Image (spheres, rainbow, N blue to C red):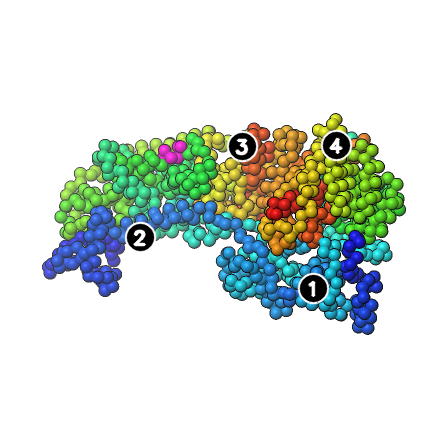
Amino acid sequence: MRFDWFLPYLRKAKPDRDDRSIGAVRRMAARVFPASWFSSRDTKLRGRIRKVLRWLGPVWYSSPLRRLVQAACFTFFLWQFLWVCWPYDAQPGWQSTGWTPSTFDLTAQQIEIVREQPLEQKVSVGGLVFLRDDSAESVSPDEDVQSVPFIVRSVSDAGIQLTPSAEADATSLELLSLTIGPVSVHPRDPASWPSHYADNLADKEDVAAELFLSIDPLVSLSTGIASRAWVWSLVSAAVILAVCVFIPRGFCGYLCPLGTLIDLFDWLVGSRVKRFRVSGDGWWVHIKYYILLGVLVSACFGVLLSGFVAAIPVITRGLLFVVAPFQNGSANGWHQVPPIHLGHFLSIVLFIGVLCLGLMRPRFWCKYVCPSGAVFSLGNLLRVTERKVESSCIHCNKCVEICPFDAIKPDFTTRTTDCTFCQTCGGVCPTQAITFVGRWATLDLKTVNEPPTHETHLGRRGFLSAGIGVASSVAAGVAAAVTTKSFGANLDAPDSLRLVRPPGSVPEREFLQMCIRCGECFKACPSDVLQPLGFQQGLEGLWTPYVNADWAGCASSCNGCGQVCPTGAIRALPLEEKRHARMGLAFINVQTCLPHAGIEACQLCVDECTSAGYNAIEFTQVGTEVDDAGQPIEGTGFLAPLMIDDKCVGCGLCQTRCYGINVSQKKLLDASAIIIKAGTDHEDRMLSGSYVQLRATEATRNASKVGG
Amino acid sequence: MRSASSLKMEVSRMKHTRKNSQTAFLICIAVLANAANAEDVAVLKTGSLVTGTVLTYDSASVSIEAKVGTRTVTRKYPASQIKSLTIDGVEIDLAKVPEGDSGVSERVNRSQKEIQAGIDRVGPTQPDWFESTPLDYPKTLDLTWPEKAEGPWDSSKNVGQYIWDRINPNPGKWRDGIRLLHHIMLTTQDKALSQRVMLTLGGMYHNLHQDYARSAYWYQQAGIDKNASNRPQAGLHLADCYWQLGSKPMALAMLKSMSSKPYGAIKLLGDLGETKDALDMAERFSKSGEASVCFLYAGDACRVAGRLKDAEDYYRKAIAAINPDEAEKPHRKRDKARAESSLAAIKFYTLDPKQVKDGTYASSSIGYEAEVKVEVVVKDGRIEDVRVIQHREKQFYSSITDTPKKIVARQSFKDVDATTGATITSEAIINATAKAMAGGR
């Protein structure tokens, strides 16, 4: 059984030669497309397809399917990163006001509303809309106006015909029937919790946005080891490893967006700059195994280093720090781009370094350094398919020259751990001697070590050097773990730094063990509430997400960070859970808070919290003067904010507002007078379980504390 | 009831109070049909049936009290929106009913007996939301609530200070407040404390919930209707409850019975239409040291009565009356700002909506805490909508919805009375509306 999909070398058919038969796909295509597109074996004239591919380059010409898959995967990766994880096209639910009911027949279930202008929004017939009575009379402080759901029967320029939905509350419907307008139309219950960011991501995320991260086996493997926990993406990693049993290292040759980006870099830059080229094999040849070992060893000590070196986190974070600021800045304005710090800088240097390795040799990173690739290389030991060379090989060396992975030995046989099954060699072989077949297929193979390769088997020196390599990588792994821990978060110390983490983050210790530092959550976070940490938590917290509430507050309608987290360091919470998950608690500094300090009236935080729907900040009267009888004097003192801790989830919107107005704009304060703090009792950090339940339990407990 | 409104047909449960040629006929039919308890029905242009009690109707509009589920709501419809109207089983042709006062009054007149019956019926019951409101208060609170709080101001300990600091400023806690007060009343044997709770309940229902029947009930339970001499503020509120429930004579009688009257009485007298008495009172009280407040109220009373020139004079007097020594105090600053913004707005009070081009206009005026911003929609010479789009008023939330409604209902702002207890906010809304519409001439 063959696993060939390269474009065979075009040669003249000869009766005495057993040429490869033309595939069924090719035969079918020949019926549909003009004959001029196809090459002829009789004349050896290239058809249009071959001409185009040849113009694109030798790799396209030899194995076009592989390049197509690469291009598709890379485009898909970019599309996911730049579009799916782009929250800014989310629109809050619209409303269309000023409608007048022209028919309101409850017995016939027929309602029609009209307006001079037609409906400016699209609604689908059969879909649900909500009507709200906007007439002044229906509004009173003690009368909660309910919106009523209706099914759209038809929409025209003349008006909208509706039928009450089965869920419509009878009283609310009857109340609504009393109105003569105006009424407003809403796509969802305007009183319900907003969810436009969450909906937007869910709508766009037909395929998980973190797909590539979750199929990088090192990501889930190291996370699983470091946290000693089940990481759901291990499943995807297992699937991709199973696929790679059939297409050995196919991930590297076909799927990996970093590999494709490196290919692009090598084509654009690497092929033009020759001065850094290295020849021959050096000490670096097996370094990827040692890096992998080091990473896994440190993971055993609970220190997760794979984010620094694993393929997909490297490209994700690279794009995040290099490309995303430009996307954000050009779309939303440059003031929306958070300032960069040493952490950003280090990541950018690392990313550029990875690309620049290509100056030494094309795909140097992939061949020699990438530990994710090393996982697949080891996985290749289980391969069931293989590149094989038949005895018709004429030692022309074309395959060796074109192999991007240096996977062909000088005797033209395969370095099986390195071959990515890209099949480029198959297409350049003038004698069609290269085939991709089952591992145990019996063919008329060429003799091994002919011509002589001068390669030595693993002798004493080889064994020694491998031993030294293993020993030193174990030592390096341990050292890295110890260094990270000793310059780390130091969580056992009572005064250790506690950062406000994204909503639904697992407990801090596990969080540091599970966060791969890929940066996907930053990308999905509207207005950059989440920002990468620098060295405040030492090495251990580098690039982990924390809430910078001076910059922005967590949008109440968003649950993006958890949805895109590949390792579950941030739990993928439904919005209903997320809005109860406590990131921290807000604390008011009564020394500086303007009304508390008696300086001036201010209610920014209260308004912000109320409009976000948490209602966690109430007013309290401060500085009231009393008359001689001890009675308060009307109009004295200020209304000041007061925290209702039970309702606060630490979203930070209050802090953002206070900082934005009182610190940045008015320059009345040096720091926000209301600050979100994390730490014991201030945040919910759970590996599993419901936050809604937690809040309910808390409420019952608090209720029992109160008398009565 | 203002004299002009006597043209209007007042339909109350006491049908015999009608003063109209049709009345006798209607009563006959009603009796014959044995439908004295039958519900009135208005069929709207939309086909909706509104079933309930017609409060008022004339050729321009119909006002109906309808019961929906457990709720009682009042809705007012222009006659053009009514397809047919049946009162006590008799169909009314609105076109043949004489036109009422164009500044249609929403006020219903009820007899003293009727009002007292209403208070006694509704007062002892709990509001709909009572059962579902959790009892929630700090456990540090001293529920014995001594008359005079010991020690420094401490709202986590003293009930009165807790209400002042925490309940009043937070609309979300107003129901909690009622719940807490009832809880205290149920658990105490102390007569004096019970009385304090009743008074506070009356104040809370009046100021926060605008539930005048329950407010009046608790004031009456506390004995304010018999003797308000020690509680002038409560007496004033009770008088306002009577007025809001529909009886000017009861309100006047209540005011008269009070030996000492608070400054707010000037305003209430003005609202009742007793402008002369109000101004006399203002002059008398102005000698007490709160002249600026008195003159502000006097100005408001004149404005409500349509005496704009006098109103202007009083606002000027209010500014002049501020003692320079006190000019920097917050409440004096506010008096001054109020008078100034009333002066700025008063020249637009004669503005007829018909002079204003169609459009949406916005303006603001100084309120209790800060500027109150209002948006006015004018269409075909009618004030379509008044909406408070930005404010910082917390204490008296009710006026935020109440005052705009009144402006739209009357199609005018010059005789809209400010919500008692929320004067400053109401005035700010009225002034802002006037200024906004002036922008559309």
The amino acid on which the numbered mark 4 sits, given as a three-letter code, is: Ala
Residue shown at 45% from the left, 42% from the top:
A332
**10 Å crowding of disc 1: few (<14), some (14-19), many (20+):** many
The answer to whether marks 1 and 2 sit on the same chain is no
- Horizontal and vertical percent for residue B369? 67, 38
What residue is shown with label 4?
Answer: B320
- Horizontal and vertical percent for residue A623? 71, 32
- Horizontal and vertical percent for residue B320? 74, 32
**10 Å crowding of disc 3: few (<14), some (14-19), many (20+):** some
Protein chain holding label 3:
A
Query: Residue A246: which disc?
Result: 2
Label 2: element kind: helix
The amino acid on which the numbered mark 1 sits, given as a three-letter code, is: Val
What residue is shown with label 1?
Answer: B50
Stretch of the chain drawn in magenta: A345-350
**Sooner in the amino-acid sequence: mark 1 or mark 4:** 1
Protein chain holding label 1:
B
CA distance for labels 4 and 2: 95 Å
CA distance for labels 3 and 4: 40 Å
Please give left or right for residue B343 compared with residue A267 in the image: right
